[in-house]
Amino acid sequence: MRHVALVLLLFVASCGGDEPAALPACMLRAGEEVNGDFATFEKGDEGRGYVTYNDGLVLGVPRRPLRIVSTAPGITETVAHLDGLKHLVGVTPYCNHPEGVEDIAQVTVMPINVEAILALEPDLVIADRTLHRSSVDALRRRFEGRLLLLETSRSLAHYKRSVAMLTMVLHDDPVALTTSSNRPIDRGRRLVGKIGLVRELIAGRLRRETYADPHKPLPRVLIVSQWEPLYVEGPDTLMGDLVRMCGCVNVACDLDHPSNTFNEELVLVRKPDVILHREASVPERLRKRWASVPAFQQGRVASVAGDAFSRGGPRLVDALRVLHDALAGERPMSALGDVK
């Protein structure tokens, strides 16, 4: 009976019935700002620090480590940005930025090869707590006292906090920020400040637009990670957060996982104004089936396959600027394909 009711609901919505009743509540309002304060860092004695996570987990880490293994491309880019490239002794096969990272030993991370990391004798192993959720217990057992878990793949706010903590771990320095300094710790502080500034500039603009027209509907965005079968990005994802920050709603905001399969029929029901995809061009079958969807009618289907959109790293801030301008109509959607 429930199945029949769902089919009827989809049919009514797609035929122009009472559409709002067919939409999840999260599509009818602006998303709430993400709280990225997932952990705190405190200095300890004798060159150690302690990270306390919101769920009570406490990890001890060395300050100013000399041999670092990174298990995610975004972490690798951030360590390099903080002048830590010379300390990286292990990275992933997916790390391709910045120049010079290709000369560093590679370790398998899908799943994480703990034995290979051990062979590199690191002072510090850095992992993404969300991306490597299934490997956290094994990493804690083998790298007690030299493991740092960051959150670089959940939201820009989480990435900002990760940069701040990583800066303190790599460059324990009490000297205050100076605008002319290019010291590694100051580059970290400037990156944190840049993230905050861009977030506030976009938020301020959205507040002005809402004040000017409070009844203007929020643009709807579908984020596709795979076409066949259809796999999309929902809540608690980095790209989903960027879309939210740009004043749009994710049409897959009610997924029960950050990423999951999605019913092709729901694309017709929820009518995205923009479709962002990480794969190659849209299959002709779906292009024909979704011809009535506003994103296709208005030519607002674009690739976000560039690395800057898919990993939490320093390039993410500039990627957000381009995304905002494209969604606001100030740049062509094709500009998103140029962001690498």
Image (tube, rainbow, N blue to C red):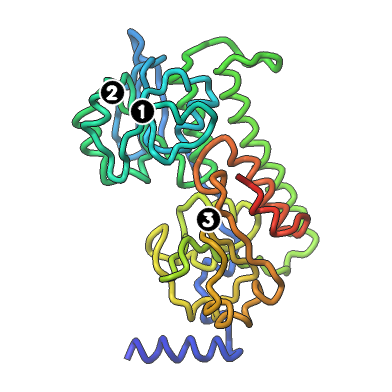
Q: Residue at x 48, y 81 (%)?
A: 265
Are the residues flagged by discs 1 and 3 in contact, CB closer than 8 Å?
Answer: no
Q: CA distance from mark 2 to mark 3?
A: 36 Å
Which comes before the other along the chain, label 1 or label 3? 1
Above or below, 30 relative to 81: below
Q: Residue at x 47, y 33 (%)?
A: 162
Residue denoted by label 2: 120
Q: CA distance from mark 1 to mark 3?
A: 32 Å
Q: Position of residue 245 (x, y in %)?
A: 61, 51
Residue denoted by label 3: 240
User: Three-letter amino acid code at disc 1?
Assistant: Ala
Query: Could you say which disc has been placed on residue 105 in the image?
Result: 1
Q: Position of residue 75 (x, y in %)?
A: 45, 34
Are the residues flagged by discs 1 and 2 in contact, CB closer than 8 Å?
Answer: yes
Above or below, 79 relative to 333: above
Taking the image as shown, residue 89 lies to the left or right of residue 37, namely left
Q: Residue at x 76, y 55 (%)?
A: 331
Q: Secondary structure at mark 3?
A: helix
Which residue extends farthest right? Answer: 212
Taking the image as shown, residue 333 lies to the left or right of residue 233, namely right
Label 1 Cα neighbours within 10 Å, binned few <14 / some 14-19 / many ≥20: some
Label 2 Cα neighbours within 10 Å, binned few <14 / some 14-19 / many ≥20: some
